Image (cartoon, rainbow, N blue to C red):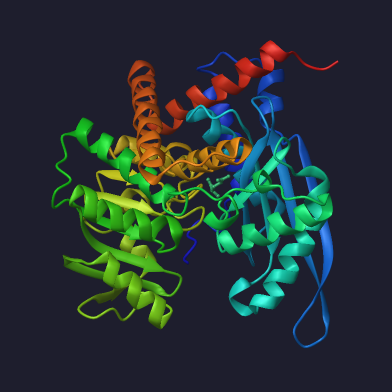
Amino acid sequence: MTNNGGAVNPFETAQRQVDICAKYLNLDAGMTEILKHPKRELTVNFPVRMDNGSYRVFTGYRVQYNMARGPTKGGIRYHPQVTLDEVRALAAWMTWKCAVVSLPYGGAKGGVICDPKAMSKGELERMTRRFASEISPIIGPEIDVPAPDVYTDSQTMAWIMDTYSMQKGYSVPGVVTGKPLSIGGSEGRGEATGRGCMYVIREAAKDLGLNMKGASVAVQGFGNAGSVAAKLVHAELGGKIIAVSDTKGGILNKNGLDPVAVEKYKQEKGSVVGFPGSQKISNNELLALDCDVLIPAALENQITRENASSVKAKIIAEAANGPTTPEADEILHKNKVTVLPDVLANAGGVTVSYFEWVQDLQGYFWDVNDVNSRLERVMSGSYRGVAEVAKKHGVHNRTAAYIVAVGRVVEAMRVRGIYP
Ligand code: GLU
């Protein structure tokens, strides 16, 4: 995936976002400083036996950013470019995300530096189990609950759940979410990030008077978040998906692509590139397409100072975490582009993770309609709350979401007090 702002450190971005909202909340310097630092960070270096019999040492992280509102929550990412600062940023964003949709959670994130595409299933299983074992002292249903993120999935979660349960001597489904249904996963969790994103796009379009029927949509990234968002915006809102992309590049068809057919093509060929009837474009070209809705659904730092002014979309719905830098936010705001920030637009995933955890703790499971209607209520209610604050303070939606989220975290910290 292209990474225009390669030099941008995501943790510095995350810290600046706290500074930006601090003045609206009248936070003093001490409180602001606390909110700009993760509470707990664990780095682990661990050996894994590779298929050829050799041993390789992998480095992984788990960062628990803030737990004032409850157990920490957030995914585990497998990627060659994982850094501690990236995981810190992602853990901060999980904290604000859980608060913006009012989940009783703090935020955390994990990552392992590896290239999962170049590893066998056996190697991935051994790496996952050893990483789970290394972080097991600080995870648990009441402590910190991992979930899938970039290049991890329900199988990864099943291995973590099993490893943790083996150590305990009994099954602990609530230690991770995003599990397969057969071991305590939730209906609707697999598509929850994309579905939640679709709901906030629908609400924002209503406010802007944008008819989503036939509206043109471009999606950067065709993984769990992007592919589901594309399919649901197409199927449920009537949007026309004109472009999608993955790490190998993008495809364009101004008359509209069938996202289900594109997904099938990618499953068979390994990429969306080459899809019949489409024209090849770069990831950068995709971001600058003339379209109504742009959905960045890949990695951080995609819309930066360099390319923000070339964005022509009316709405940017951030299915990815951290795709837009603070400088880009200002440019987009000036150009009247409505940004639906990551902490709101992709909160559907963690919302259904919360539902999964609740179901696990109760041992009582809901049907998919129950899950989706509760998700819809959470997403549209949270969107309304953010939009109202944006209007009240005359700020863009990201700052508004931070005013809501950071305000809730601060309230929890104030009422608890600073120990001792
Ligand atoms: N990795 C997802 C996110 O960034 C989901 C986290 C979770 O469900 O805990 O929001």
Expressed as whole percent of the image width and height from the top left, the position of residue 312 reads: 25, 50
Q: Residue furthest bottom?
A: 52
Residue 382 in view: yes
**Does 364 appear above or below 388?**
below
Expressed as whole percent of the image width and height from the top left, the position of residue 319 reads: 42, 49
Q: Residue at x 68, y 25 (%)?
A: 68
**Does 269 appear above or below 213?**
below
Q: Residue furthest front?
A: 364
Looking at the picture, tell me which residue is in the foreground, 139 or 171.
Answer: 171
Expressed as whole percent of the image width and height from the top left, the position of residue 403 reads: 49, 23
Q: Residue at x 39, y 81 (%)?
A: 268
Expressed as whole percent of the image width and height from the top left, the position of residue 93 reads: 57, 39
Looking at the picture, tell me which residue is in the foreground, 317 or 164.
Answer: 164
- Say whether residue 250 is left or right of residue 135: left
**Does 116 appear above or below 215?**
below
**Does 66 appear above or below 277?**
above
Q: How many marks?
A: 0
Q: Residue at x 69, y 30 (%)?
A: 67
Q: Quadrant of the C terminus?
A: top right
Q: Residue 260 is drawn in which quadrant?
A: bottom left
- Say whether residue 274 is left or right of residue 341: left
Residue 312 in view: no
Looking at the picture, tell me which residue is in the foreground, 204 or 161.
Answer: 161
- Say whether residue 190 is left or right of residue 12: left
